[in-house]
Image (tube, rainbow, N blue to C red):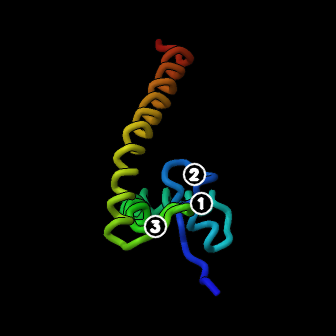
Amino acid sequence: MQGKRMVRQLSDRWLAGVASGVAAYFKVDPMLVRLGFIVLSLFNGIGVLLYLVLWLLLPNEDAIVIDMPTQVRENLQEMQHAVGPFIARVRDALNELATYLNTTIRRP
């Protein structure tokens, strides 16, 4: 019998599937795990570091893991491809918010 392992989910992923994978492993709501990462990030910054470490170490749910160094290399390549578009989406959302606030807030 094969044991349950923690993997990064392909479905319900916002960035890398870490939070949804942790949530599936512990059978909790992914929003609670995401909130946990955010709270840890705000209070001492460890949430971002923890997320990145888990992203590096956890395989995708469809990955065939040969060995850990190969898994880490594959995850690093995925990080390089995913982070750029994610930062662009965040930047665009912040620009839209700034534009909205500039048009709705009247200055004296």
Secondary structure of the residue carrying tag 1 is helix
Residue bearing the label numbered 3:
58
In the rendered view, does 10 fall on the left or right side of 102? right
For label 3, count other residues whose C-alpha is less than 10 Å away and answer few (under 14), some (14-19) or many (20+).
Answer: many
Q: Marks 2 and 1, Cα distance to the nearest angstrom? A: 6 Å
Identify the residue shown where x is 37% and y is 73%: 67
Report if the CB atoms under discs 2 and 3 are less than 8 Å apart.
no
The span from disc 2 to disc 3 (Cα, nearest Å) is 14 Å
- In this orientation, which residue lies closer to the viewer: 53 or 65? 65
On-image quarter of the N terminus: bottom right
Identify the residue at image location x=48%, y=18%: 102
**Crowding at label 2, few (<14), some or many (≥20) Cα neighbours within 10 Å?**
some
In percent of width and height, residue 2 lies at: 61, 83
- Describe residue 83's horizontal placement relative to residue 1 as left or right: left
In contact (CB < 8 Å): disc 2 and disc 1: yes
Front of the two marks 3 and 1: 3
Residue receiving disc 1: 20
Which comes before the other along the chain, label 2 or label 3? Answer: 2
**Alpha carbons under labels 3 and 1: distance apart:** 12 Å
User: Is residue 44 something one can see in this rendering?
Assistant: no
**Residue 55 makes an appearance in the image:** yes
In percent of the image, x 36 and y 62: which residue is there? Answer: 49
Q: Which residue is mark 2?
A: 13
